[in-house]
Image (tube, coloured by chain):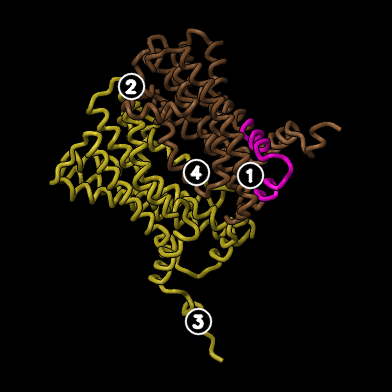
Chain colours: A yellow, B brown
């Protein structure tokens, strides 16, 4: 009897991509119940922006400072769906006992991880869009209609880069007992290190370098530049930086998973919850 | 035979047991303190950066606000998470069926939340003071500590009511995560509630910590402009609302326990 070559049994790239895009929100991604999704898109951006706008107002901040903070937080809320949610996939796999099966699966890893990130990318796009709408409607952020295409490109690039970063953290979490700590750290440290509430230059130099390593910093800079009407070279440079941050994150996450997969198969213990 | 034996349970012993179990769970996995600490510490540092150069008392705002957020986090997450975990593990039904009223179990957990909230507040204080390079200017440190503990008590009262509500709902996680900033805004964690639009005041005054925190700021920040009625009415309001919450919690727990036993669907996760 003829036996099929193992590579012939490997699911196709598109099938793996699609299966993960459809299944991950129902199984492993955190924050993916419809009430959470709607809350993440419509409630969190507004309440977070209101909170920081009033903090700025307490220190006698004017309209410009409030607008700066509101725009920063409108973009920063993307971390809920892109980082916190995606990062939890590792925990979920361990908790549900599916990690071992995943690790021995012949599925293409890039398709697997990219597929898991598709829905979070869409939710991230929606979150930032609604945040920008709030910023423009309630917090005096002026978004000229002519800048919308540039803003849209910046938002899409930021969403991709942030989901890549979430997958990277998910890879790190494979080695940890839980991803909750990592998720929380990067959920909120962007507020401090990415120029969300005050310019990055206000921080000590070492912290500025740390901020520069975060995709949110570049994504936010690109969105701020696009909203300010910057065009041409400077904006394209920022887009390049966001795209590079995203590519590095995706690449590093796949490399990291490969390393930990080998370790998991060698020790047989890493996938335990 | 004592009354406790006649009833088949001792409230104090049940509360102590719940407190001990919470402590043991914390010791087994102390990293749970970290998630509820990260946001307040970062918010405290962000507020400090925003307030830098605006006078010595803005440091008090930053520390007080971040400390309050830490304790809110412990209260909201601690109460909700415990009930949610009971439901997930299948221990909610046996706990409710036990002769001990569920209120005593929750009380033990809330007491632990108070302790860990204080621990969190101390960590926030240490981090922000280390970054600021000096402790906040406090006119009356002892009064500050006493009022701070009082604020904790008002938060605990809210935690008990929330815990009762969480038995009914599968949306505890939603309320905690999505409503987090709304609570911070509504109770004026980082800024006086009077800065908010006037129509929000009745909602904010519904929460005991709003009153208590306003009183604490009156006592610790010279020139503070909070509710126009001042310090003592704030204290009276905090005492009244806290008492109302505790009475309400007792009534709700009684009703919840009866209802869930009648309906019998607690194990539907």
In the image, which disc is placed on residue A88? none
Q: Is residue A68 above or below residue B269?
A: above
Same subunit: marks 4 and 2: yes
Tag 3 residue: A5
Tag 1 residue: B257
Chain letter of the residue carrying label 1: B
Chain letter of the residue carrying label 2: A
Which is in the foreground here, disc 4 or disc 2?
2
Work out which quarter of the rendered image holds the C terminus of chain B and state it: bottom right
Instruction: Name which residue lies at 60% across and 42% down.
Output: B255
Q: CA distance from mark 3 to mark 4?
A: 41 Å
Instruction: Name which residue lies at 44% across and 59% down.
Output: A25
Camera-nearest residue between A18 and B88: B88
For marks 3 and 2, the one nearer the N-term is 3
Tag 2 residue: A58
Q: Main secondary structure of the magenta part?
A: helix
Q: Is residue A149 above or below residue B220?
A: below
Q: CA distance from mark 1 to mark 3?
A: 61 Å
Q: CA distance from mark 2 to mark 1?
A: 44 Å
Residue B89 visible (yes or no): yes
Which is in the foreground here, disc 3 or disc 4?
4
Q: CA distance from mark 4 to mark 2?
A: 31 Å
For marks 4 and 2, the one nearer the N-term is 2
> Contact (CB < 8 A) between labels 3 and 4?
no
Q: Is residue A33 above or below residue B11?
A: below
Tag 4 residue: A182
Q: Is residue B171 left or right of residue A243?
A: right
Camera-nearest residue between B23 and A256: B23
For the magenta stretch, what is the residue range?
A: B91-111
Q: CA distance from mark 3 to mark 2?
A: 68 Å
């Amino acid at each position: 009897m003829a036996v099929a070559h193992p590579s012939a049994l490997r699911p196709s790239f598109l099938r793996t991509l699609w299966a993960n895009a459809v299944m991950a929100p129902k199984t492993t991604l955190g924050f993916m119940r419809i009430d959470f999704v709607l809350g993440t898109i419509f409630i969190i951006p507004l309440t977070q922006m209101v909170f920081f706008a009033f903090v700025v107002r307490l220190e006698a901040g004017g309209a410009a400072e409030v607008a700066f903070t509101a725009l920063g937080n409108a973009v920063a809320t993307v971390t809920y769906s892109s980082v916190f949610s995606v990062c939890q996939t590792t925990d979920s796999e361990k908790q549900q006992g599916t990690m071992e099966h995943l690790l021995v699966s012949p599925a293409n890893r890039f398709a697997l991880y990219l597929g898991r990130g598709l829905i979070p990318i869409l939710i991230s796009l929606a979150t930032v869009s609604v945040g920008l709408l709030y910023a423009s409607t309630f917090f005096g952020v002026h978004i000229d209609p002519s800048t919308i295409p540039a803003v849209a490109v910046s938002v899409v690039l930021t969403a991709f880069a942030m989901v890549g970063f979430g997958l990277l953290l998910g890879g790190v979490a494979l080695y940890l007992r839980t991803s909750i700590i990592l998720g929380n750290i990067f959920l909120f440290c962007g507020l401090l290190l990415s120029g969300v509430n005050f310019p990055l230059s206000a921080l000590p130099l070492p912290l500025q370098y740390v901020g520069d390593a975060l995709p949110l910093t570049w994504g936010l800079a690109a969105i701020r530049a696009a909203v300010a009407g910057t065009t041409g070279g400077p904006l394209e440079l920022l887009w390049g930086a966001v795209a590079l941050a995203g590519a590095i994150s995706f690449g590093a996450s796949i490399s990291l998973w490969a390393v930990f997969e080998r370790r998991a198969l060698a020790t047989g213990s890493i996938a335990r919850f | 035979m004592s009354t406790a034996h006649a009833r088949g349970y001792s409230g104090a012993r049940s509360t102590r047991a719940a407190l001990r179990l919470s402590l043991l769970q914390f010791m087994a996995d102390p990293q749970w303190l970290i998630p509820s600490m990260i946001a307040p510490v970062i918010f405290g540092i962000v507020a400090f950066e925003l307030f830098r150069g605006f006078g010595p008392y803005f440091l008090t705002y930053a520390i007080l606000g971040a400390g309050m957020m830490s304790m809110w986090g412990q209260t909201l997450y601690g109460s909700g998470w415990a009930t949610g975990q009971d439901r997930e593990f299948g221990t909610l039904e046996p706990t409710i069926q036990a002769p001990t009223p569920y209120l005593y179990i929750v009380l033990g957990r809330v007491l632990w939340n108070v302790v860990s909230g204080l621990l969190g507040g101390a960590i926030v204080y240490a981090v922000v003071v280390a970054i600021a390079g000096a402790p906040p200017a406090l006119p009356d440190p002892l009064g500050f500590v006493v009022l701070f503990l009082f604020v904790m008590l008002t938060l605990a009262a809210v935690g008990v009511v929330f815990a009762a509500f969480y038995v009914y709902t599968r949306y505890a996680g939603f309320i905690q995560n999505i409503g987090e900033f709304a609570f911070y805004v509504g109770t004026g964690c980082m800024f006086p509630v009077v800065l908010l639009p006037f129509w929000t005041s009745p909602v904010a005054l519904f929460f005991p910590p709003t009153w208590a925190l306003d009183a604490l700021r009156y006592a610790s920040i010279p020139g503070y402009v909070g509710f126009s009625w001042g310090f003592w009415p704030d204290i009276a309001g905090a005492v009244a609302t806290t008492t109302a919450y505790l009475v309400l919690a007792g009534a709700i727990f009684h009703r919840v326990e009866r209802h869930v036993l009648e309906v019998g669907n607690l194990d539907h996760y």
